[in-house]
Image (cartoon, rainbow, N blue to C red):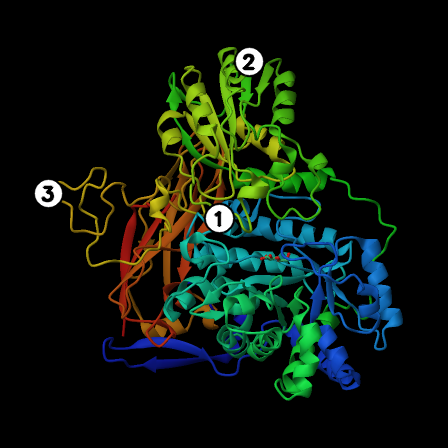
Amino acid sequence: MVKMQSSLFVATILFLVIFSPENTSAQTREAIAVKAPNPELASDVINRKVDALLEKMTLEEKVGQMVQYPPGNGVVGPQTQRQDFDAMITRGEIGALNVADRKRANAYQRSAIEKSRLHIPLIFGLDVIHGYHTIYPIPLGLAASFDPDLVAAASRLAAQEASADGIRMVNSPMVDIALDARWGRVAEGAGESTYLGSIMARAYVHGYQGRSLSDPSSVAACVKHFAAYGAAISGRDYNATDMSDITLRQVYLPPYHAAIAAGAAAVMSSFNSLNSVPETADPYTLTQILRKEWGFAGFVRSDYNAVAELMEHGIALDSASAARKAALAGLDMDMASSIYHNQLARLVRSGAVPETAIDEAVRRILRVKFALGLFDHPYVSEDTPAYQATAEKRSLARKAAEESFVLLRNEARDGRPLLPIPANVKTIALIGPLADANSQMLGTWNAKGNPDDVVSLRSALDQRMRQIGGKLLFAEGTQIVTDRDQGFDDAKQAAHNADLVIMALGEDALTMTGEAASRADLGLPGNQERLLEEIVATGKPVVLIVFSGRPLVLNWAAEHVGSILEAWFPGIEAGSALTEVLFGDAAPSGKLPVSFPRAVGQEPLYLSQFSTGRPAKDADLSRPPSGMNGKFVSRYIDVPNAPLYPFGYGLSYTTFDYSPVTLNTREVHLAQLMTEPGVGVAQPAIRASATVTNSGKVSGAETVQLYIQIRGASMVQPVRVLEGFQRVTLRPGESKRVEFPLSFDELSIINAHSQQVVEPSEYTVYVGDDSDAKQNTSFKVIN
Ligand code: BGC
């Protein structure tokens, strides 16, 4: 399991030895007095200010703090009927708005500060997911970098840009674990791994919130969507989720917890129901887990219009009941539905909702406003120059894009791999609907991203070919979604006239990925695969660049196309970063944060599946079972179990050799695991290491990955799970010893009592370049 405890919890840790009938003993730890993970939200100074202000507030003013509207920005559901924002603000009826324009923000803020009775500032929020003006790759692409420092730097810059427009809260990070590629929102998060997701969650929060929330260039991170939104049944957006408490705590909750432990000031509840309770009104997640177990002191707001949707869920017959259920569960702010605004004060007066619940919600909201320094600095300067995509910003965006690309295939032709493009290539045919599509490169949720800032693949390649005295031919070939073939002939002609073909194919970022974009077919859309087949049939070498917000089924390409590069949606530096990688100025270094399926029917497809009693390990899965042979095992009869490209996979232009994995010891006592860095003391009891060597001819970055399998515990565990990674850059011939400390957090599981424990069991440790890593060793945890 990944880290569930922040070092801020360290002082509160209690060690227990639990005896259970099935398992001889186990070590667990529990917080005895949960402290707020973000001390800025729990300071005495702030609490005193909050209490003093609360005393002066009327019931309507309190409810006003719990209301958020989207006046024209970020409308992703029914449009609110209200237009009288200024009057409502003046009456103290609004606490937050979605606005992305500094003049409008200042104007609204003036009404709050100068005209409202108590002068309480508004907080402006927006969906800033992978950049504000400077747009980076979509979060799934950023996750493929396995580079949390990069993610923190990108989020820091996003915070600076957004805060200059008055935005002090971002609806990010999205940390929903996504195991099903049909779900469109896979694009918005870090993919399938709980461990990677937790590391990335922390990096985003550190970037957004900086050293202190009170820094005017910091924004409050609103981590979302709490909880388990990514487990939507059938991968259909907004659908219900249903799972055991063990799976919830072991697979889904850790990334949210990592964000909270890193200090996230706000949380957005999710649209889905979880085990039959809509998350907008779920006391188990919003109060028990978030507040009581994790000590979260910030505020929770609903997703867009979700309080009203409690009626569609069928757990509220009218809006009064929806408001009551949400407020009592611990939902502090209602985004967009108007229901708190219209109902809450009346519910308090009738005794249906105690005023103490309202007071507590308002306290949480005001705490964040004070911590952000909004009372002291409510306005932003309107004089700062308009956004410029400076060289510095572009270079960060380019680095992010380069690190996000995953080389899936690079076959040799005439004795050498197709990529990087060799010097004798003088004419390139660039074909495909995504080759010259600036707005597509910005991906889903692109805030104030401007297509004019985007360098397309076509323009960057064209420039490069001119520089080297070569020529770029371009043909769109087809559109993203169409069955019309008119462009095929021009495309084939271009291919005939070229030494090399580059195809830019994939999904429509804006309609096929992100929210409300679930797909039941995971192939290249429209007639793109047919175009690809016809171009490959010309006999010219083909490099396929896939732009997508999710894993696609690429079986045909994987057999017939020389090189395949997964590019996600790379942001404003799309073309320049791709050109650098195609020509070998930088070697590709991304690794897959999601498994790529062979068939939609394999979904949800992910590495960390549970062990079964009938594993298919000895069966030949490449063919259907014959008779009894290979039949009665956990398998499909028509498709292998394994993904086409596994989690963690990604090639480079160089090769890396791994030494055998070694451990500092083969046995560790349970008690030793309690004296480790996560729990307070120096060296972890178990350390796995391996030496990785760049055995090729060019420099490259490698993500060394550590996986574990636990056997002999009280609960069935996954066949393999990521519990560590390190990105290293090596020159040709250079070696590096990489060490992975394994402490309580990496070794623990959730037991039948929903406790995070380490039990006496056997651990197999794999280290390698992807989740198929073969090098392994093992150790035991004993009593
Ligand atoms: C999405 C959220 C988003 C919100 C506000 C909702 O539809 O689910 O992720 O933050 O809209 O735009």
Residue type marked 3: Gly
- Whole-Å distance between the Cαs marked 1 and 2? 41 Å
Is residue 306 left or right of 22 when viewed as pictured? right
Q: Secondary structure at mark 2?
A: loop
Q: Secondary structure at mark 1?
A: loop
Mark closer to the observer (1, 2):
1
On the image, numbered disc 3 is attached to which residue?
627
- Across and down, in percent, residue 481 comes to 52, 33
Mark 3 or mark 1: name the one nearer the start of the chain. Answer: 1
Q: Are marks 3 and 1 in contact (CB under 8 Å)?
A: no
Farthest residue, direction front = 317
| Coordinates of residue 186 in the picture (x, y in percent) | 49, 50
- Residue 258 in view in this figure: yes
Question: How far across and down, in percent of the image, does residue 261 sit?
Answer: 55, 68
Label 3 crowding class (10 Å Cα cut-off): few <14, some 14-19, many 20+? few
The circle drawn on residue 547 is none
Q: Is the C-beta separation of discs 1 and 2 under 8 Å?
A: no
Residue 192 visible to an observer of this rendering = no
Q: Is residue 73 left or right of residue 505?
A: right
Per the model, the C-alpha gap separating discs 3 and 1 is 38 Å
Asked if the residues shown at circle 3 and circle 2 are in contact, with their CB atoms under 8 angstroms apart, the answer is: no
**Quadrant containing the C terminus in the rendered view:** bottom left
Residue 670 falls in which quadrant of the image?
Answer: bottom left
Instruction: Give the residue type that dot 2 points to.
Output: Lys
| Disc 1: CA contacts within 10 A as few (<14), some (14-19) or many (>=20) | many
Q: At 65% from the left edge and 78% from the top edge, which residue is drawn?
A: 361
> Which amino acid, mark 1?
Ser
Q: Which mark is residue 426?
A: 2
Report crowding for label 2: few under 14, some 14 to 19, many 20 or more residues within 10 A (C-alpha): some
> Which mark lies nearer to you, 3 or 1?
1
The N terminus, quarter of image: bottom left
User: Which mark, residue 518?
Assistant: 1
